[in-house]
Image (cartoon, rainbow, N blue to C red):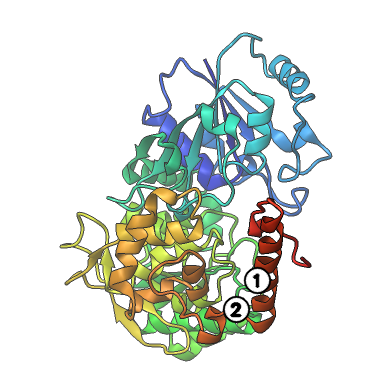
Amino acid sequence: MTQIIEISTQYQLANISALVRAGRLGEPKERRILVVANNSFAPELTPAADAMPGSAGLLADFDAVVDWNATIWPNHPKAFGISGERAPIMERALRREWDIDDDEQLELIVESLPSHPAGALTQIFATADISVHSDGLMSYGPIRNPLTLPQWQRLKSIYYTDLLPGITPRQLAEHDPNRVVLPTDELAGVIDEMAAEVVDELASAHLDAPIEGSALVLGQYLAQLDLITAEEELDLHLQMLDVVKAAGLTTVIFKPHPTSARTTTGPLRRRSEELGLDFVLADVPLLAEIVVSATRPELVVSCFSTGLATAKGLYGCETAAVGTTKLLDALAPYQNSNRIPLTIIDALHSGRYSLPGTLAEAGPSSRVDAGSGAATGAGSDGAKNLNPLIDAVTYCMQSDSASYLRQNAIDFLEGAVGGPDMKYFKRKRLTKLDLPGQQEIPLHRKTLSAAKQRLVLKAKRTQHVLKDYGITVDPSKLRKNG
């Protein structure tokens, strides 16, 4: 058995290495080929996951490492698919190039299906078992497009990191795959090893040791996703500094998102000085989790970054979310894959929700709403189970593939109408799906217009005339012009 494992980010690489070392990907005798896809907009200018600082020690967990971009050049991994006629030819070529016998059984372990590059590999290796490795909070929601018949018939397992204890990812749940859980301590061990490997890079940015009284602010690139304006995004980051000051901490470690513009750094530095906070810029090509491992901040602040969940789940950091209510209103369309991460982060920092099994010991995280600047403590007194909310939002996002959750959604919404949880839903969406909380249909729209009434009357008259001649016609099939 040969496992072909496809990844596109360093965080995915860390998760896969942790799965391998924990024995959750099978016996050590399995041959493992790591296929690295660089999905960035300009892969020529951005290092691939295996070339990033901290990755070298993880590559020893694989028998071979393949550059997928070079394999399919000059195509981009996100755009490269293959026809059914050509797929067997490419499979034969890749088996020869990767030293795989023609009759050897394969298992594909890929990232998000059905999009490329994962989709292309399932097309090429058309008889291989398929497993999906999930990283981050998006795995707790549905996929955007349904799997093809050949894909879901071969779907075997989902591998995911237990960032939300007691919550089972809804990703591909409609196909009932085997779910393999990676405990967070297994991943934390890999992250710590990566941090040790890049100690020189961390030292050059003064990040190689714990920083007392510090908070890590994780930047996001919301303006570049057209979710908010650049001015609103800057204001959001400035509010994050206010949260740090309010927490009584003395140092801000700001890590901008790798793909974001660096125009916010200057204003954030000046604002930190005004607040009397030391400012440390972590503009290093390293995972946020590596920075957390090395600096051990007391607080991690962002909007809805997965880094909030990993900082808390791997290292027990307190967390705060800023501006989530504003983003919930702005995010479009409703099916946007960011909706589940945003919903989870907002709910867990709202004071109204907690994870199953942690309702009694949840930490005092907080959320700050953009515009209001008012912190809301997230103590666990009276907190509700997060699962029903995720079920309801998942169904509203993808009602076809998540049809099994319809009654769950109805039950949740019946109790939510008129309350604060309605911010997680759009009334137009609820109306389309005929769910509690939908818009009231205006009276004038409940009756047919005069013109439509005349058409109905004309159709009925035509039916009577035809009936006189012994001809029966279904009125619905009559042409509108009679």
Up-down relation of residue 230 to residue 1 (above or below): below
In the displayed structure image, the side of residue 454 where residue 425 appears, left or right: left
Q: Is residue 208 visible?
A: no
Furthest toward the right, the residue is 74
Q: How far across and down, in percent of the image, does residue 97 sit?
A: 73, 18
Up-down relation of residue 20 to residue 412 (above or below): above
Q: Earlier in the sequence, mark 1 or mark 2?
A: 2
In this orientation, which residue lies closer to the viewer: 21 or 366?
366
- Disc 1 and disc 2: Cα gap in Å? 10 Å
Q: Amino acid at mark 2?
A: Leu
Residue to which mark 1 is pinned: 456
Q: How far across and down, in percent of the image, does residue 423 sit?
A: 42, 76
Q: Secondary structure at mark 1?
A: helix
Tag 2: Cα neighbours inside 10 Å, few (<14), some, or many (≥20)? few
Residue to which mark 2 is pinned: 448
- Residue lying at 75% horizontally and 27% vertically, measured from the top left: 84
Q: Are marks 1 and 2 in contact (CB under 8 Å)?
A: yes
- Label for residue 166? none
Q: How far across and down, in percent of the image, does residue 179 sit?
A: 37, 36
- Residue lying at 54% horizontally and 58% vertically, measured from the top left: 337
Q: Secondary structure at mark 2?
A: loop
Q: Amino acid at mark 1?
A: Val
- Residue lying at 46% horizontally and 15% vertically, measured from the top left: 29
Up-down relation of residue 7 to residue 314 (above or below): above
In this orientation, which residue lies closer to the viewer: 40 or 117?
117
Q: How many marks?
A: 2
- Which image quadrant is residue 173 in? top left
Q: How far across and down, in percent of the image, does residue 395 sit?
A: 44, 57
